[in-house]
Image (cartoon, coloured by chain):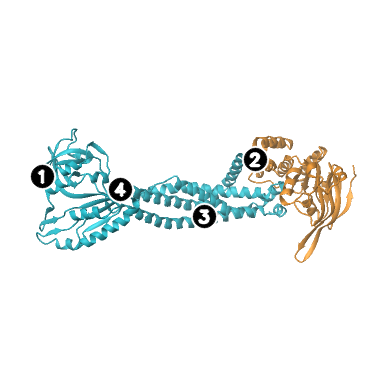
Chain colours: A orange, B cyan
Amino acid sequence: MIREAGSNSDLSDAAKAKSDIEIIKLEDARKIYQMGGSKVNALGGVTLSFKRGSFWAIMGPSGSGKSTMMNVLGCLDHLSSGRYILEGRDVSTLDDDSLSEMRLRHLGFIFQSFNLIPQLTVQRNIELPLYYLGWEAGRSADRARELAEKVGLKERLNHRPSELSGGQMQRVAVARALANDPQIIFADEPTGNLDTATGKEILGLLTELNEQGKTIIMVTHEMDVAAYSKQRLHMLDGLVGRVEGAEE
Amino acid sequence: MRQIKLARNVLLGIEDLLLHKLRSFLTTLGIVFGVGSVVAMLSVGEGASKEAMDQIRKLGSNNIIINSVKSVEEESTSTTHSHMSIYGLTYDDYARVTETFKTIRRTAPVKLIRKEGRLGERALELRIVGTTPVWFELVQRPIIAGRVLMASDDNEHAPAAVLTEFGARKLLAAENTIGQTLRIGSDRFEVVGIVKSESGQAGNIQIPDQEVDVYIPINVATAYFGDVTSRRTSGGFEREMVELHQLIVQVDSIENVEPVANGIENMLSRFHKKKDYLVSVPLALLRQAEATKRTFNIVLGSIAGISLLVGGIGIMNIMLASVTERTREIGIRRAIGAKRKQIISQFLIETVVLSIMGGLIGIGLGVLVPVLITYFAGMPTVVTLKSIVLPLVISFAVGIIFGLYPAVRAAKVDPIVALRHE
């Protein structure tokens, strides 16, 4: 299905074969914001590719463009110019509905502030992507239970987020991010609101998921958090500075 | 499958609304009153037209009723001693009316005398109606026993009398009424039949029959009782000469009722020096009822319209506040993969659920109000299916109309901004 979706006419067979390995590819990606009279280059022509099954940390000081990078890669924002190829499909020209569809089918998100919906129970929060995928109630409840067990929150299914600790809330967020069985998981400062011990638990969970074959892209500014990743991308003024970590 | 999904969405909407019970309830108040007044309005209108239809049924929709009335001048002069007032419809009028208008199907002349009737031991103050057999064709009431008057009774001056069910019961309370002798003054009549009777007022028209009626051939009435009645009053005797008290005219079709009524009015005015007659048209009752209904519809309709508008704006206001309050939630849903139209449908469903709940409460209120109106104001009201379905449709429409803008606003929320929203 993904391959079919990716069979755009502008992609050659060779490129298609390559996309099996390269799950994310940016070509001269630029994002320009109009700030009053002046233009800000949030991304100033980035070319990069991430392989399937890799674990990247995107680092950099605030204003370096790492948030913009995250939004673009997460199909939440459009490029001003350049191309973004996700799962072999050029998504830089997609409309809003198709981008939603890409997020729904291929991506999972974990945020610094957990971003659970407060009035919904843990189960409902985990089920949210399945609801939009149109799963029937019974099947999604089973899936939610299975995922809650995986993150160790089986007993908390009927609790509301306000009744949980920060670590538990982030576990719920991880479970929700996994509900649609995505290939790529984006984690935006996933430990930013957690103490060190619980932060480590979450990072352990991410490592585990990476070992199971998920591609993980994490934004952080903390070195010891970034240490959990296999590769690190340092950003500065909207450009890729340094790349660390071995290519496998 | 679609229905299941919709039902699920509606349930989710209800859950969200139940989180703010008081707020949701207050939000719907405008709709509650709006819908309530729509229901009340419709039931009052329906009640008025049903009452009018009932009256017309009692009076006969094709009938014109002409009554003799004492004119105003006559009323004032009659206080002098032993003055005889002569007024009202004449036998000539009866003949003229019957002969002049082609569209008149039949005419029943009515002569009324008030006298006591006796049957054995029992006595009852009767209204003696001298008329022709045509009466029973114009004022259709079921026959309970025996027969009604026949042409032969009239021709042969037979002393036949037809009682009403009420009169029969009052006089006898026993079987075998038919064939018994009814004494009115010194005259004897044979009871030949019993009919059912209606009684009361229909609008401002007295319905033609009463419970204390006894029907006898008009020729007999004229021969036995004459045209002059006298009454003892404080000042002496009051004497009246009236040939006919009433003419009931049946026209061949409803469209001709009003032209004929006008024609009769014109004709009578040429032959009568004083206005000692009154032409009434039962059909006019319907017009009157419709006018009442229209007035009610305009008054209550404006109230309902304003309430619904205010209610709708109230709902829109709260939904806009809700969208702002839930910006972050919208951002989360969008990031997860919800499409714009799914966000729209979520908020739209919530608004519609809210307005329909308001509508249902309003219908409950609106059904109660007509009961109170009937109880305290004595106005007839009828709650029909239409007066329940229409307000439901209206509240649904209000939900859609006033929910659309907040829902579209919600869908326009940029997920990146929303996720940063605190």
Residue B212 in the figure: left or right of residue B341: left
Query: Tag 4: residue type?
Result: Gly
Query: Tag 2: residue type?
Result: His
Q: Which residue was labeled with disc 1?
A: B185
Chain ID for label 1?
B
Q: Is residue B87 above or below residue B9?
A: below
What residue lies at 15% left-to-right and 63% top-to-bottom?
B77
Q: Residues under labels 4 and 2: Cα distance?
A: 72 Å
The numbered mark at residue A159 is 2
- Dot 3 crowding, Cα within 10 Å, few <14, some 14–19, many 20+: many
Tell me where residue A33 sits by quadrant: bottom right
The outermost residue toward the bottom is: A37
Q: Can you give x and y, in whole percent of width and height, for residue B199 in the image?
A: 26, 46
Q: Can you give x and y, in whole percent of width and height, for residue B285 in the image?
A: 33, 53
Chain ID for label 3?
B
Q: Is residue B328 above or below residue B150?
A: below
N-terminal of the two: label 4 or label 1? 4
Using the image as rendered, state which of residue A219 and residue B144 is in the foreground: B144
Q: Are marks 2 and 3 in contact (CB under 8 Å)?
A: no
Q: Residues under labels 3 and 1: Cα distance?
A: 71 Å
* Screen quadrant of the N terminus of chain B: top right
Residue A65 in the figure: left or right of residue B169: right
Q: Is residue A18 above or below residue A47?
A: above
Chain ID for label 4?
B
